[in-house]
């Protein structure tokens, strides 16, 4: 089956997930039972976006020859999003039985292993991708604005860590969980900084679907970092019910980040389709095209 | 063409694109002040360039809207160049530098102008011997292989195959 998802479908998916999650979150302030619906919808949204990204990422990786940096990059992206999907399943297994607080249920905090792993794998993927682009002399020189943005990302990390008591697993009795959570902002800052570099690559590249892909990846990482910062600075309890900024802002950022990431992969996959269609035309009509070329050559000689 | 004036075809094209080094630009400007032949040739190149840009813009618009139309417009692009009768060199068909422009026009909507320019420049450097600056008929095949490899490394096998296909078709018309 030839998979050819339109970008518009991703937009509709994002809009639907945002609408449902925000609505149930607001309703949970009136009737707490709606909180369960929010948790389920969030899980479905994240799982769908990540698994879809994984499927596309693997197909994109197969587009590249074995042993190339780009194939490695897309395989690592596939692995990172599938680790995210596993994290969702892990969390749902606990949350479906009412175990929402890792301070009371320490094993829930082990989700930080998935978080840290995903960030590390994503860092490797973006590094490989950047290295591949440098072969075309793209992304070699950063501008002052790029360094300034990277500096902003780096300087955001200490205040987020300082406010670590607002993070979900800060109360875990297991030290490994607390240390992994503290490392989360650092591990996210690195791929977020690389997202800035890839955005520079997209600007140097010009137009095209690959440039759109890179912009989506950079935007997704910026949103994830913003979500983390919002969760750290806005309030103590990400599990709070109701329509407060504490609960809504990080949730909207997280949902949008995952779907924007998927949108980037859709654009890259459609680039492959676009190119393959062109090849099929040349292969199916080659004789006719060669005849046209011969006629033009004869005309210009006369 | 202007090798007797020590300015290559590729340098003229880069001068028009504004991508030539400042030192080389200054040398060309000095030469233009004293050489009427080159001034006339440059005006001809500018007319040719405006036709190329117009056709490339049509290619880009189509590429962002739908798939599979770029090859049709690439043929129209080549026909338009001939029908306008604007040639950098009289009495020739498709020169290698023009064939390179055609491949760049094919790559621009797929890869982006910046990536396409860098890929072509890199392939040119990889394909030309020491002392050569332009792609020529003997090394056209090597140029296409290097370009397809460079593009395919970043954009995948379909892009590599596309460049190989179109490059081999264009090779039939290069003289």
Image (cartoon, rainbow, N blue to C red):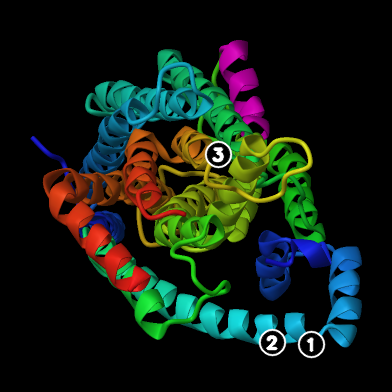
Which residue bears the numbered disc 2? Answer: B40
Rendered residue at 68%/42% (across/down)? A160
Image position, residue B153 (x, y; %): 49, 33
* Disc 1 from disc 3: Cα separation: 32 Å
Q: Are marks 2 and 1 on the same chain?
A: yes
Chain under numbered label 3: B
Q: Nearer the viewer, residue B127 or B93?
A: B93
Which residue bears the numbered disc 3? Answer: B139
Is residue A181 one of those drawn in magenta? yes
- Residues in magenta, as a range: A174-187
Q: Earlier in the sequence, mark 1 or mark 3?
A: 1
In the rendered structure, the answer to whether residue B74 lies left or right of residue A142 reads left
Image position, residue B27 (x, y; %): 90, 70
Do tag 2 and tag 1 residues touch (Cβ < 8 Å)?
yes
**Which marked residue is nearer to the observer: mark 1 or mark 3?**
1
Do tag 3 and tag 2 residues touch (Cβ < 8 Å)?
no
Q: Quadrant of residue B102?
A: bottom left
Q: Where is A177 relative to A276, above or below? A: above
Chain under numbered label 1: B
In the rendered structure, the answer to whether residue A268 lies left or right of residue A158 reads left
Decide if residue B43 is in sight here.
yes
In the rendered structure, the answer to whether residue A68 lies left or right of residue A99 reads right
Q: Secondary structure at mark 1?
A: helix
Q: Secondary structure at mark 3?
A: loop
């Amino acid at each position: 089956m030839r998979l050819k998802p339109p970008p518009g479908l991703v937009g509709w998916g994002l809009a639907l997930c945002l609408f449902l999650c925000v609505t149930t979150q607001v309703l949970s302030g009136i009737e707490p039972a709606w909180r369960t619906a929010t948790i389920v919808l969030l899980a479905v949204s994240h799982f769908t976006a990540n698994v879809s990204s994984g499927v596309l990422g693997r197909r994109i990786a197969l587009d590249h020859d074995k042993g190339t940096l780009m194939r490695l990059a897309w395989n690592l992206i596939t692995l990172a999003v599938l680790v995210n999907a596993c994290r969702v399943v892990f969390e749902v297994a606990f949350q479906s039985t009412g175990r929402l607080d890792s301070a009371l249920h320490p094993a829930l905090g082990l989700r930080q292993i998935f978080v840290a792993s995903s960030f590390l794998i994503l860092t490797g993927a973006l590094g490989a991708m950047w290295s591949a682009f440098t072969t075309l002399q793209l992304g070699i020189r950063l501008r002052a604005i790029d360094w300034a943005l990277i500096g902003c990302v780096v300087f955001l990390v200490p205040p987020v860590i300082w406010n670590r008591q607002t993070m979900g697993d800060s109360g875990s009795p297991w030290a490994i969980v607390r240390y992994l959570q503290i490392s989360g902002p650092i591990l996210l800052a690195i791929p977020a900084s690389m997202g800035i570099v890839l955005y520079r690559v997209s600007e140097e590249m010009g137009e095209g679907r690959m440039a759109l892909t890179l912009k989506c990846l950079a935007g997704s990482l910026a949103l994830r970092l913003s979500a983390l910062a919002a969760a750290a600075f806005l309030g103590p309890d990400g599990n709070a019910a109701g329509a407060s900024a504490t609960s809504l802002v990080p949730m909207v950022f997280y949902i949008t980040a995952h779907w924007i990431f998927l949108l980037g992969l859709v654009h890259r996959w459609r680039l492959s389709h676009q190119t393959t269609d062109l090849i099929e035309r040349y292969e199916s009509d080659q004789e006719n095209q060669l005849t046209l070329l011969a006629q033009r050559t004869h005309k210009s000689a006369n | 063409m202007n090798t007797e004036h020590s300015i290559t075809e590729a340098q003229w094209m880069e001068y028009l694109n504004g991508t030539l080094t400042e030192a080389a630009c200054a040398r060309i400007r000095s030469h233009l002040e004293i050489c009427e032949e080159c001034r006339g040739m440059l005006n001809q190149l500018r007319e040719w360039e405006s036709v190329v840009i117009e056709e490339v813009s049509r290619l880009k618009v189509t590429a962002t809207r739908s798939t599979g139309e770029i090859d049709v417009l690439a043929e129209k692009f080549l026909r338009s160049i001939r029908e306008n009768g604007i040639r950098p060199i009289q009495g020739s068909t498709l020169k290698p530098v023009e064939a390179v422009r055609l491949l760049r026009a094919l790559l621009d909507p797929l890869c982006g102008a910046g990536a396409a320019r860098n890929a072509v420049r890199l392939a040119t450097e990889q394909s030309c011997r020491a002392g050569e600056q332009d792609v020529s008929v003997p090394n056209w095949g090597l140029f296409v292989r290097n370009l397809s490899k460079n593009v395919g490394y970043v954009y995948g096998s379909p892009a590599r195959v596309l460049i190989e296909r179109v490059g081999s078709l264009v090779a039939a018309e290069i003289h």
